[in-house]
Amino acid sequence: MVDAYSGDAAPDSPMSAFKRAFKYYKSRNPPPDMSTVWAMDESDVGRGVRISPLPTSIHSASSEQAELGLNPIDQWTVATIDSKPGIMLLRGVFRPESHLYWLDRCLRAYPEAPNVTNLDAHSDQKLTQIWRGGDLNRLRWTTLGYHYDWLLKEYRDESRSPFPSDLDALSRTVAAAAGFDGFTPETAIVNYYPPKSTLSGHVDRAERDLDQPLLSFSFGQTAIYLSGGTSLDEEPTPMFLRSGDVLILYGDQRLVNHAVPRVFAERPFSDSAAFDPIVVNYANSNRVNITVRQVNVC
Ligand SMILES: O=C(O)CCC(=O)C(=O)O
Ligand SMILES: [Fe+2]
């Protein structure tokens, strides 16, 4: 399956450590040994994984946090890896019932005009009502704010639409809680992962201000995420990203190779009167990831 970043693959040797790991975790036959994937849910001295509460230096209004579907910040935890300063994996951020809210936004609202999706990027006419048109299974990405140009690999000032206010508030709250007070959400890529889909190895370097973190929100089913180094020869770390996980990359980790070689279903979502059964159904077999970035030096 071709994914949005596949044209971005560096001309690496076929046997780079990163590519080898990608193939290993993507393989169906034989399937990978899942016990080799880092769970990151408890401290592990051997691997240098530390889990701690988030230092609660910021206090955004708790009413706003509740509106965004967030747990109180003192219930969040952060996992770090000693050998990879610049990765923070936040857990406990979202209340369980809010995962479907964000999935609903990614499926019903964000793909609509003026936002751009893979379904209309190469068509003269903006497709509307992807949701009602039954095109959900072909939806692979939506861009918000600055619309990333996949061919030119850049953001252009002419191609920009308003950033959704709920995602803006979520991103600012999470960034500030993690110590990035000045973060300004200006663009997001929503990636949709049906079963068996992958995201090829790539580095996110198009943003003009690389001193700002990148926030990555995962909802729905679970991914194996490969966190590599700046060289494809560096052995990547495989880790699970589950619904509600927030990965923050900054500093030395802002420009590393990463990929999603596998998505698998393990998380049941129950029917709920608050959500269309199509959303619940989608959540039960697909994964959605939102990466939020600041483009400019603000
Ligand atoms: O789906 C993910 O976890 C990663 C997405 C990603 O790397 C990207 O959008 O640049
Ligand atoms: Fe990326």
Image (tube, grey):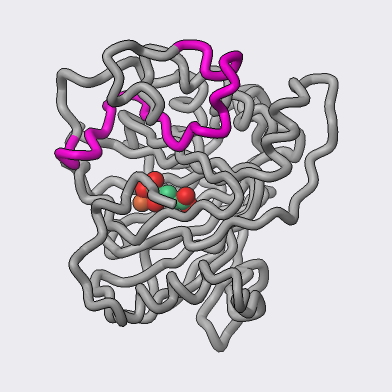
Q: Is residue 91 left or right of residue 2?
A: right
Q: Is residue 145 above or below residue 191?
A: above
- In front: 235, or 62? 235
**Percent position of residue 256, x then y:** 29, 64
Residue 78 in sight: no
- What residue sits 59% from the left and 69% below the top? 28
- Vertical relation: 92 (above or below) 256: above
Depth check, front residue: 82 or 263: 263
**Stretch of the chain drawn in magenta:** 128-154
The image quarter containing residue 202 is bottom left
Q: Quadrant of the C terminus?
A: top left
**In the image, residue 193 lies in the stretch drawn in magenta:** no
Residue 186 on image: x %, y %:
31, 29
Residue 78 drawn at (x, y percent): 56, 59
The residue sitting at 51% across, 43% down in the picture is: 289
Residue 215 lies, in percent from the top left, at 42, 45
